[in-house]
Image (cartoon, rainbow, N blue to C red):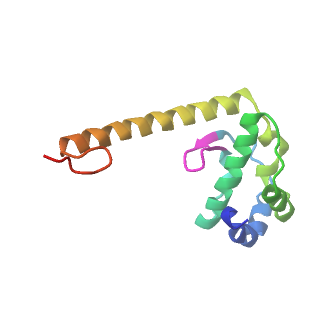
Amino acid sequence: LATYRMEAVETGAALLDSICVPDPNATPRYDVMSDAIIWSDEDHPKLTTELICALRQIWHFRTHCILQGKRIDSDVIDKCVRLFPHWIGFLSERWNQTPEVLAEYRRGDITTRWCLRNLERECEKEANNNGMDTKGSIDAV
């Protein structure tokens, strides 16, 4: 459980549980840091950095379930549900696979992969221009 930043989750459970009224205009968006879909009203201004890091793992797991098309059992998620059962991120409709959510995830995933490929190409080009191989070693002359 330590890898899921359970200490931050336990400390912030009351705050998360208080985020219980969904915004009817909330929209899903891709979060590159968690490789996940989050809804705009889940990114609350009172969340600490530690709590956001913990939530990223929950968001990632939820997105994995969405992509699989089924809810997967998880002791960590079960514990989180016990700690903050009213949090809007646990609303059943936010765990469902919908065309809108799948399209948003695909857009974010493809864009991220494209950016990373371009960055890798730039790094290789820069390394080659500086007489280095792609691992950063100086070529023997």
Estimate the x, y position of residue 35 in percent, counting from the top left: 60, 44
From the viewer's perspective, is residue 29 above or below residue 17? above
The one nearer the camera, 57 or 1, is 1
Count of numbered badges drawn on the protein: 0
The residue sitting at the left extreme is: 141
Estimate the x, y position of residue 68 in percent, counting from the top left: 75, 35
Estimate the x, y position of residue 46 in percent, counting from the top left: 65, 64
| Residue that appears at 67% across and 54% down | 57
The residue sitting at the front extreme is: 140
Residue 66 in which image quadrant: top right
| Residue that appears at 83% across and 65% down | 83
Examine the structure image and report whether residue 35 is included in the region drawn in magenta. Answer: yes
Residue 69 in which image quadrant: top right
From the viewer's perspective, is residue 49 above or below residue 134? below
Estimate the x, y position of residue 127 in percent, counting from the top left: 25, 44
77 displayed left or right of 42: right
| Residue that appears at 76% across and 41% down | 65
Examine the structure image and report whether residue 82 is included in the region drawn in magenta. Answer: no
From the viewer's perspective, is residue 2 above or below residue 59? below
From the viewer's perspective, is residue 26 above or below residue 50? above
43 displayed left or right of 33: right
The one nearer the camera, 99 or 35, is 35
Q: Quadrant of the N terminus?
A: bottom right
| Residue that appears at 82% across and 39% down | 93
The one nearer the camera, 97 or 119, is 119
Magenta part of the chain: 29-37
